[in-house]
Each structure stands twice: as C-alpha cells, then as structure tokens.
Amino acid sequence: MAPPNFRKRALSSLIILILTAVIYLAMHLLIAAGIIGPFIRGIINIACINIIAAVSLNLVTGLLGQLVLGHAGFMLIGAYTAALITKNSAMPLSVSLPLSLLAGGVLSAVIGLVIALPALRLRGDYLAIVTLGFGEIIRVVANNLEFTGGPAGLSGIKSLTTRQNATGMFDLIFPITAFVIFFSFTFGTSRHGRAVRSIRENEIAAESSGINTTYYKLLTFTLAALFAGIAGGLYAHQIGVIAPSRFDFNKSVEILMMVVLGGMGSITGAAISATFLTALPELLRSIGKLLANVLPDVMTGFFNNFDQYRMLIYSVLLICVMLFRPKGLFGRSEISITPLVDVFRHQGGRAPKKRKDGTK
Amino acid sequence: MYLITQMLNGLGAGSIYALIALGYSMVYGVVKLINFAHGDIIMVGSYMIFLTLGSGQPLWVAVLVSISFSAIMGVLIEQIAYRRLLNSGAPRIALLITAIGASIFLQNLAQLVFGANQKSMPKMFQLPAIRIGDMNVSNTLLNIIVAFIMMAFLQVLIHATKTGKAMRATSEDSGAAQLMGININRIIIFTFAVGSALAAVGAVLYTNTYMQIKPLMGGMLGLKAFVAAVFGGIGSIPGAMLGGFLLGLAESLSVVAGQSKWMDAAVFALLIIILLVRPSGLLGKHMKEKV
C-alpha cells in the first residue's frame, strides 16, 4: 500500500524536477544569448558551491544540532585532493574532474569519520572547539607540506569552462547542487533523518528509544564532510587557485553564517541565504554604481567597498539574528510547493493548512 | 644553556597565556560560555596602550586606561550581545555563535579604525637587565611575577570575599543562588569586568614582550589561552595558570626542536587529546551530566 500522501508527494517531486530542469535550460539559454556574461556566470557557480557547503553544514548544525566550526577544513581536503588529481592526470578534464571530485569527497568523508569518532563523544561548545581545532590543524598541515605547495597553494587548476564551452563548470556544478539538496531533503525526512533529529531534541531520550545515537551522529558527520569535500573540489576548479588561507576560520564562519541566517534546520533556508550572501557584495556594488549620482558619496563609497566591511556586517548580522530571531529567517520550515499542488488539485477548493514541521 | 633560555622564554609567553586563560576560566565558570571575544579584548587593550602612550601620556596612565577601557568593553559586549540570550535561557549553541560574532566584529572594527597593518610599540618598562647566560630575562621575570600576583589576587577575590562567594554560588547553581538573594546579573557583569581587566593586564605584558600589535592578534592568542584553560581544567584558577605555563613551555620546546611551524597544529592537537582523555583538565573537577 502506498502511503496516503504518496500521490501528492510524487506530484510535487515531479514538479520540482521539471522546475529544476527549466532553471537549468533557462540558464543555458541566457548564457548562450549572452545575457549572462562570464562575471555573473562565475557568481552563479560560486553561489551553487556555497549552497552545497551550507546545505552540508546544515546536516550537522541544523539536523543534528551540533556546532561545527571547521567546515572549511573539509572543503580544503576536497579542494586539494581534486586539484592534485586533475593536475597530475593524463585523462581529459571532463573525465578526471568528476572522478577527482569523488575522490576528494571520499577522502574528506574518511577524515571526517576519523575526526568524528573521538570528537562526537563531546557535545556543544567543546565539540565546536574541537572541530575548530581540527580545521586549523588541516590548514597548518596544508601550509607546511611540500606537495600542497605550502602557503602559496596550488595554481593553474584547469576549468571546464572554456571559450568554446561557456557552461562547462555550470553543467557539472548545477546537477551536483540539485542532487545534494535533493539528497539532504530526502535524508532529513526519512527514518534516518527523524532519528538524527531526535538526537538533536534530546540525546538521552533518543538513546532510550533504541536509536543508535553514535551511528547516526557518525553518519551525519561523515555525509556533511563528503559534501563539503565535493564543494571544495568544485571551488578549486571554479577559482583556479587555492591556498590554505582561503579555507581559514573565517571561511567556516561564513558558511555557518549562511546556515544560521537561513534558519538552522532548513535546507531551502540555507540555500537561499547562501545565494543571497554570495551575491550581496556584487549586488551592493551595482546598486552603488546605479545610484552614484543620487546617493551621497559616503553611501556609494560604502557600496563600492563593501568587501572591506563584509565581515563587519556579517558579524553584526550574526549577532542580531541570534538575539532577535534565533531560529533564522525560515526557522526549521522549508519552502515547499506541496500546498500549491493541493490548491490546484482541489481546483481552488479549501487549501490545506501549511505545515510548519518541514515535512511535505 | 640554549634550552634553559628557551624554556624561560616559554614561561614568559606562558604567563601571558595564563593571564588570558584566567579570564576565560572565570567567565566560563560563571556563565558556562566560551567567550570568543576574550582574545579580542586583549587586542583592544593593546591598542589602548599604544594610543595613550602615543599621545605622550606616562606609562601608568596608559596601563590604567587600557585596563579600565577593556573592562568597560567586556561589560558592553556582555550587555549588548549576551545579556538577552543569557536571560532567556537560549541554547548554548546560540550563545556560542553570538560570541563568535562579537569576536569577528571586534577584529574587523579594529581593522577599519586602526588599519590592517601591524604597529610597533615603543619601549615600555625600563627594567634593570638581569642576565642568564647572554640573554636578558628581566621581561620574562616580570611576566611571571605579574601572572602570579594576579593569580593570588583572584584566589583571594574568589575565596575570601563576599562577591567571590556569590560568584562561586552562581557558578554552581545560578537558580539557587538567585533564590538566596544574589543579584546574578551584577555578578555576571562583575565577572566580565574582572576577566576583561585581566585580559588588559595580559595585553600590557604582551605588548611589552613582543612590541608589535595588529587587529587580528587576538584570534590565535585567545584560542591558545582557551586551550590553556581547558588543559588546566576550565573553571579552576590554579589550573588556568598551570595550563598557561605548560602551553608556553610546550611551544618553546617545539622551537628548540626546530619545528616551530607545526606549533599551532600541536597546540590544537594537545587540546583534542586533553578533551578526549581528561575532559575536566589537569586540576578540574569532573562533573557528571544529569538527566
């Protein structure tokens, strides 16, 4: 017997699939038509990578409820692994890049597991500090080893985007992003996800209900490390140059900021705030240019040099969100099209009440 | 001889860690919050010394300005960033995120106000040279002596005064302390003020020893001091001192071994090992989690 909501869920999944395909094709058209230039294209790719990173951090911080301050460390592992493989491989990039991403993700997941085994015995702020420590250790190691290029890092990492193929990187990044979001969502609403969430609510109660807390904590942590590693690999090939300093504590905080702003536990929230925070500096710069004649010089100066004030404003934002809306913009709820589906199926009849618990 | 001078150096650096760790430990003991911004208070204190000395004031004025400004800064951070969350009983994770926010805010504000470049400090204390071998150890001795005086001062404050008793009570059970008529808010403010003032004393020693300051100096310094506090047993004052000195020694030994580039990684590795093997630290009390 199919569950009662099966048809509704199937329908909304289908709609989401179609929507994703439409967005993908629309991007292709816009890029082919030259409306989206290389600059915006780069920002879109970076936004997608940040979405992967934020959604993966959301698994641990939102779903499991543990603060991780070393997420950039896992990105670093993925980035270096992938870059070293594609740089030293004889295969064409279109083959070696996906393989290297996988390798980077797996290595990151393995290291994540090794870290999680001891670290997850700790909770709360101690776990946060330990993950911060691991992130720093990974960075220092990358800084001091020979084959990672030391503090200068690696450069000349090839990109799939070429003169002939303007959507090279996008074609790889976008499906991966869609998959990570899809996977996180199904994981979060599955039996496993409910088990993980029960650990967040009360670990002792979860354990007494027969949930293997250690297993689920390790699973979540490893999954997050896996996706972060893939995000790192994509980042390396999108930017072309990586150095240990790009994956420092500030980077971890930036990803955390995306999760916190969107709402800890909300995947769509994390995705939207990741997109927003990635685009914000450029957005403000263009606003500044647009309004250069109207605004006083102080304001345009601020808009144009936003990068200088970025972390200052992020930190104020972080504090304000925690003080005034600790659950973030979306809380734990998701933006879902299921209610819309209902409206259409009932032909404008009584729309069912919106659910707030994030399930469809 | 080289080993002895290096170890003395380590003890000198360790006493700075110890002073900062004392502040961490105090705040953690009372409000159970890892005050990430604590390291950046040291940076604020250092810039205050730099500015007051630069404006031609005598040293004792600079030290006083730095200590009082840092104490005010600590209280301000507590009032603006933590107070609401502390009162509403928000989850610890929210407090920690706010503390990180406060730390990043201070770092970036300082970069804007003072510029991102490092500044050189003028010579501060005119000490008679005390030589061991060919090294002048007067600064190192000063650091160690000041650290011990501060520790003694804190011990007296916490174990022999009424305020100290109230602090211990709040630390043990803030609800019960409130029922006994202790004004918890005042105790928390007092704790932040004293902790930040200690950080400023650490800043005085730091600037005197290293003679260079920059807006981001507080980050690593604060984290290392935190490691020291955890090492010694967070919440324990002699523990924070012991942790600071041991950390300083460990660092100087890594210099002796020619592996100073791995120093930071080693510090964090040490932290992880302690937390796994003996989470309560060397001198801390083990607390069981209640259901």
Image (cartoon, helix red, strand yellow):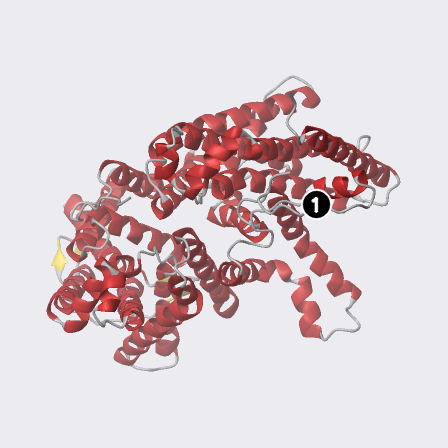
Q: Amino acid at mark 1?
A: Pro
Residue occupying the far top of the picture: A90
**Residue B213 appears in view:** no
Badge 1 density bin: few <14, some 14–19, many ≥20, Cα 10 Å:
few
**Image mark 1: chain:** A
Q: Relative to B62, does residue A291 appear above or below in the rendering?
A: above
Q: How many marks?
A: 1
Q: Relative to B94, does residue A237 appear above or below in the rendering?
A: above
- Counting from the top left corner in percent of width and height, residue A283 is at 71, 57
Q: Nearer the viewer, residue A162 or A339?
A: A339
**Residue B76 appears in view:** yes
Quarter-of-image position of residue A160? top right
Q: Secondary structure at mark 1?
A: loop
Residue occupying the far right of the picture: A33
- Counting from the top left corner in percent of width and height, residue A48 is at 66, 40
- Counting from the top left corner in percent of width and height, residue B281 is at 21, 45
Q: Relative to A271, does residue B208 appear above or below in the rendering?
A: below
Q: Is residue B283 left or right of residue A147?
A: left
| Quadrant for the N terminus of chain A in the image | top right
| Residue tagged 1 | A352
Q: Is residue B83 left or right of residue A324?
A: left
| Quadrant for the C terminus of chain A in the image | top right
- Counting from the top left corner in percent of width and height, residue A36 is at 81, 44
Q: Nearer the viewer, residue A75 or B63?
A: A75
Q: Relative to B64, does residue B151 appear above or below in the rendering?
A: above
